[in-house]
Image: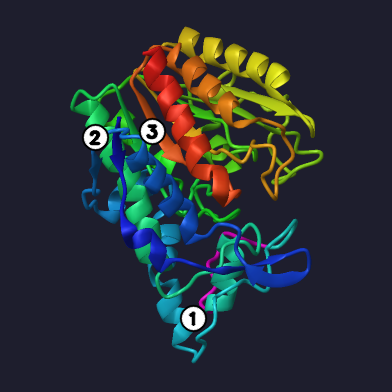
Amino acid sequence: MLTIYSPAHRLHHATELKDGLIKPCFEMPSRADTILARVQAVGLGEVITPRDYDTSRYARVHSERYVRFLENAWAEWSALGRTHDALPLIWPVRDLRSDIEPEHIDGKLGLYAMDAGVAITAGTWEAVRTSANLALTGMAALEAGEDSAFALCRPPGHHAAAEYMGGYCYLNNAAIAAQACLDGGAKRVAVLDVDYHHGNGTQSIFYHRADAMFVSLHGDPKQSYPYFLGHKDEQGAGAGLGFNHNYPLPHGTAWDAYGAALAHACRTIAAYAPDAVVVSLGVDTFKDDPISHFQLDNEDFLRIGETVAGIGRPTLFVMEGGYMVDDIGINAVNVLRGFEAAR
């Protein structure tokens, strides 16, 4: 399987506000480097660098003002003499306005942030745009005839919506790739999210559309981040009604229940008959993940790949979460190996 990777991800290593403390992010550079090492160790296939794409490709799923904010945020922050990570201090909740963009960077950070897990540093924009380019390059590979590809994206993307960042995510790599598939002439595309945390950003982006089905297996939002999306009754709206499918699962879910839900999800996607499938590949469903609560073991990730292969469509895997760095390479690559073995 073709892997797309860039060392530019190392330019972003931020802090976060978690449990009331400012601390280094769980989303760290060693995540991607560990996966790449495993890709190479097992001889998964060729590793290439991404093409460069214009920011207009990101604005196919994000607003132009949001993309512009990401591109310029560090310059505006550092112009005030600030050399530490940029984090918001206010959020426009409930009846506060969000239609007018503040002029001050503190206001912009609050407008465009869902949480305090998306600090911006001097290298964030270059890492973020390169991550999106990995996904676009992967989709281009499918369009050129590859059956599958793996975009080793970092930072991840599935919590980022049209106009907000959150959960370590800035640009929604999977959604950008899915939209590129449609822009390239596909009639339908499906996004399957197997990260422990619900892909609220991807759901939000495609919620009113019939040409992009979103299917997610995740920790029940009554118990788990992002808390405010991911319930079973969220089924799409307008033209998108019936094209959004959530499988919230309780703490402690192990393979028997997870595998049954995944099989049902994949049958749902197969019946939709998409031209391509984008898999938001989070492996934080692992039993020892430090911020998640499922009980999957290493070999279960092989089964995930085998099950996804049964959809029978060209498939782009886009890396999302997974924070047990010692095992992240084994688990991510097991999904890819399971997929290839079943093809």
What span is colored magenta in the figure?
Answer: 97-104
The reply to whether dot 2 and dot 3 touch (C-beta < 8 Å) is no
How far apart marks 2 and 3 lie (CA) works out to 11 Å
**Front residue of this view, candidates 276 and 331:** 331
Disc 1 or 3, which lies upstream in sequence? 1
Q: Residue at x 51, y 24 (%)?
A: 302
Residue 205: give x, y in percent of width and height: 51, 39
Instruction: Give the quarter of the image for residue 46.
Output: top left
Q: Is residue 116 left or right of residue 94?
A: left
Which quadrant is the N terminus positioned in? top left
Name the element at disc 3.
helix
Which amino acid type corresponds to the residue marked 2 in the rendered image? Ala
Q: Is residue 321 above or below residue 1?
A: below
Q: Residue at x 48, y 30 (%)?
A: 334
Label of residue 77 in the image:
1
Number of callouts: 3
Residue 101: give x, y in percent of width and height: 53, 67
Q: Is residue 156 left or right of residue 2?
A: right
The reply to whether dot 1 and dot 3 touch (C-beta < 8 Å) is no
Which amino acid type corresponds to the residue marked 3 in the rendered image? Ala
Disc 2 or 3, which lies upstream in sequence? 2
